[in-house]
Structures are given as C-alpha cells and as structure tokens.
Image: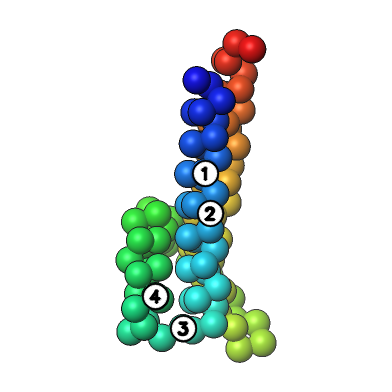
Amino acid sequence: MISLILRLFYIFTNLVEALISIRFILLMLNANKHNYLVSTVYKYSEPLVAPFTGVITMNINLFGLNFDVNSLVALFFFMILGYILISLIKAFSVD
C-alpha cells in the first residue's frame, strides 16, 4: 500500500513540475497566448504559480529571453515539497 502511495506522489510531483517547467519555457520564448496548447498550459499552471506572484519582483532579460522568476520559485517550492512528503512517507513506512 505504501508503495502505491509513493508512486502516486512521484507521479503527481513530476506532473506538477513538468507543467510549471513547460510554462516557464513558453513564457521565456514569448509563446502566443492565443494558441490552444499554450493557453491550456497557462490555464492549468496558473493556480500553481499564482501564490508565488510578487514574491520576487525582479525581471530577468537575458539575450532577449524573459525569465519568469515566479515560475522558478514555484518550481523549486514544489520540488522541495515533493521531496519532503516522499521522504516522510518513506520514513514512516514499515517494510
């Protein structure tokens, strides 16, 4: 049972990280927001990134590419949160 829960946490964590990473890349490349795929990624990733909006107000523009710092903060937060939760599940599991 613990193995199934761990797998589900791994899958969920990876999906969240992938969605935020795709959002970061699309924003960096200034993708067309009216495209169906791009707007879908923005729609589903916005609730994940919204709590971190304004944490860091710096804009990074490097070689004409805009780096969305809020997406990076959200990505690191969910990476750390996923690691902590998976470690806690492993620590309290009886093998």
Kindly report the distance in space between the C-alpha atoms of the residues bearing marks 4 and 3. Answer: 10 Å
Does the CB distance between marks 2 and 4 fall below 8 Å? no
Q: Relative to 11, is 88 above or below?
A: above
Q: Residue furthest right?
A: 63
Q: Relative to 73, is 84 above or below?
A: above
Horizontal side of 52 relative to 61 (left or right) equals: left
- Image quarter for residue 43? bottom left
Residue assigned mark 1 = 11
- In this orientation, which residue lies closer to the viewer: 13 or 27? 13
- In this orientation, which residue lies closer to the viewer: 48 or 41? 41
The structure residue drawn at horizontal position 58% and vertical position 15%, both measured from the top left corner, is 93
Residue assigned mark 4 = 37
**Residue 17: numbered disc:** 2
Q: Amino acid at mark 4?
A: Leu
Of the two numbered discs 4 and 3 in the rendering, the one whose residue sits closer to the viewer: 4
Q: Amino acid at mark 3?
A: Ala
Q: Reading the chain from its start, which is encountered first: label 1 or label 4?
A: 1
Q: Amino acid at mark 1?
A: Ile
User: In the structure shown, which secondary structural element does the residue marked by tag 2 occupy?
Assistant: helix
